Image (cartoon, grey):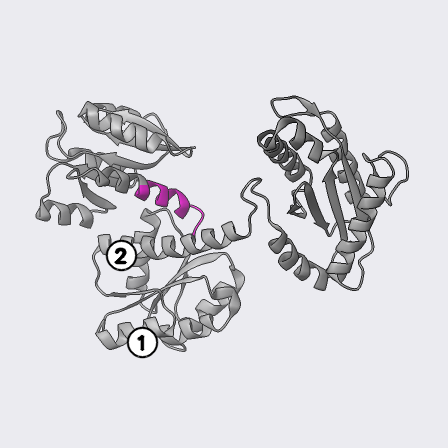
Amino acid sequence: MYNILVVEDTAVVRKILAKLIGANPFFRCVMCKDLAAAKEALNQGTTFLAAVVDLNLPDAPNGEVVSEVLGHKVPVVVLTGNFDESLRSRLLDRGVLDYITKDNRYAYGQVEKLLDRLRKNLETKVLVVDDSKMCLNIVTNLLHKAHFKVLRAADGLEALGVLESNPDIKLVISDHHMPNMDGCTLVKTLRQKSEYQNLVFIGVSAEGDGLLSAKFIKSGANDFLKKPFYHEEFYWRVFSSLESVEMLEMIKQQANLDPLTGMFNRRYLFDKGETLFKTRESYEGFEVCIFDIDEFKQVNDTHGHLIGDQLLVQFSSIFKNHFGDDLVGRYGGEEFVVISTKDKISLHCDVLNFMNEVRTTLFTEKRMAVTCSVGICVDACDTLDHTLEAADAYLYRAKGAGRNRIEPLNSEVA
């Protein structure tokens, strides 16, 4: 959980911010009504992700709280009732992340959105590419203030090496004119590789004419900034580009998930499973297990589909806990699949432990005892489809032999 310092003298505004920021499960608000309380909170050694401060406080009417908070290396978001262009510029130049006025109800949502972005930035790697050390330092400092993890490169060729060594980089900010490889060539090179299709790329240049901007965008960049740029514009261009890609990734991810259980769906199981199947020689093993909740239709017929859904959700939660290292998903209805690359003995132990927990758990508000049957194909067939069919045949054998058992690993009740 991350601490957020809020310094605001108006009780109503404090209440609004506490509700909005506190609704985020990652945040804990530390509320202060004046500069003295803020100093006390800052001097207690608490680590703050960021601070939201008003400029006009009873004991600090001229924005003195900003200097106090920045002095403790805490990023500052100013939330004030007055818009002063000159003051705003000075504060942004001093390192304030944003200057937001309380002129409408959306302003408070903007604050919460910015704070959540800072939280996400803690795990976001950015590569800055520029042959000018001064420009590298300026951009790096801006990114560090927003909690990004920053890597650097002096030209496009060096950037390619850094990206290869750090495949989790999410954003590249690159100058255009550089030795060895310029910015446009860099983004063109990256977009030709499938692993960099979702990489956010922002081009920057002192030229900044319409032709260069268009050239960057047509080459595959997400955005373009002209040097020198305002800090506020820089942050919101970066944040907006990241959020757009994250939104697309979330939509794509949702298409791969079963809406009831949150597990991967049948389509994703086939897509990802096919990749594992093709590279199975590099793993300790390759096994497919199909699990089926015994007498599930009777649960729906007796208690209704709402209870049946509760059972599926609870069952899937236990399922994910036991097979978290494997590819798992809901195959359909009450059937669940594990595609494992573990050795056979380890997998068998996981299956036995899972079945034992299922047997000793009382499910749903009805506190029902439940069992399941399992079919396992421990030797991959010529295709993934045939491997799944073999596991399914073993599952039906387990059902036909009385349920609550594993086939073919043992012929007794597991």
Q: Are there few (<14), some (14-19), or many (20+) residues within 10 Å of tag 2?
A: some
Residue 143's spot in the image, x, y percent?
A: 33, 52
User: The residue under label 2 is which amino acid type?
Assistant: Phe
Instruction: Specify whether 15 is left or right of 87.
Output: right
Identify the mark nearer the N-term, 2 or 1.
1
User: The residue under label 1 is which amino acid type?
Assistant: Lys
State which quarter of the image contains the C terminus.
top right
Mark sitting on residue 185: none
Residue 394's spot in the image, x, y percent?
A: 83, 47
Residue 123 included in the magenta stretch of the image: yes
Residue 99 included in the magenta stretch of the image: no
Magenta segment main secondary structure: helix
Mark 1 lies on a secondary structure that is helix
Number of numbered discs visible in the structure rendering: 2
Residue at the disc numbered 2: 234
Instruction: Specify whether 319 is left or right of 372.
Output: left
The residue segment tinted magenta is 113-125
State which quarter of the image contains the N terminus.
top left
The furthest residue to the front: 301
Mark 2 lies on a secondary structure that is helix
Q: What residue sits 86% from the left and 33% below the top? A: 413
Mark sitting on residue 215: 1
Residue 74 placement: quadrant = top left
Residue 69's spot in the image, x, y percent?
A: 25, 35
